[in-house]
Image: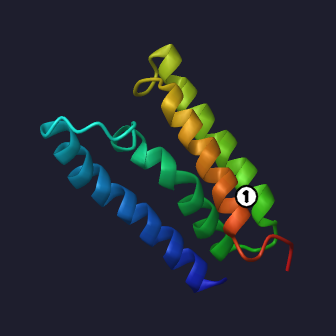
Amino acid sequence: MNKKYTLTGMSIGLAGLILSHTYRPYIYANHIRDFHIADTIGSIVCVPAAVLFFYGLNDKRSVKEYTIYALLTYIGYELLGLFNIHGTFDWYDIAAMVLSSILFYGIFPCRTRQ
């Protein structure tokens, strides 16, 4: 168990929640055009937060595997909106998840099995 990664993942998730409850209302209230960043904050942080959290708990799998699993899980969760099972479906969220996954994997320092 690597507490550093686990706590970093939790911190990123918490930062996403805080931004969703502060930045998003501010942008909406002031009619600021931010290129859908306010709409996709949760989707931007969800994959990096989950990968770091679970990699910190168990590093038996590679970061690449965790990134792919997290991305597919969150895309599946987003697709539930198409069937009115949960939330609303938004292509911007899927694009944000894919982009943040690619950027995260590109900058993460340890990409191989340990």
Front in this rendered view, residue 55 or 111: 111
Q: Residue furthest left?
A: 29
Number of dots carrying numbers: 1
Residue 77 rendering spot, x and y as whole percentages: 55, 34
Colour approach in the figure: rainbow
Residue 74 rendering spot, x and y as whole percentages: 58, 41
Relative horizontal placement of residue 32, taking residue 15 as reference (left or right): left
Q: Secondary structure at mark 1?
A: helix
Residue 79 rendering spot, x and y as whole percentages: 57, 25
Q: Amino acid at mark 1?
A: Tyr
Residue at 23% across / 39% down in the picture? 32
- Up the image or down, 5 lies above or below 29; here it is below
Residue at 81% across / 72% down in the picture? 60
**Hey, which quadrant is residue 73 in on the image?**
top right
Residue at 57% across / 34% down in the picture? 94
- Up the image or down, 76 lies above or below 25; here it is above
Residue at 54% across / 62% down in the picture? 49
Query: From the image, which quarter does the N terminus lie in?
Result: bottom right
Query: From the image, which quarter does the C terminus lie in?
Result: bottom right
- Up the image or down, 94 lies above or below 85; here it is below
Q: Residues within 10 Å of mark 1 (few under 14, many from 20)?
A: many
- Up the image or down, 105 lies above or below 24; here it is below
Front in this rendered view, residue 23 or 73: 23
Relative horizontal placement of residue 54, taking residue 49 as reference (left or right): right
Kindly identify which residue carries mark 1: 66
Residue 45 rendering spot, x and y as whole percentages: 49, 55
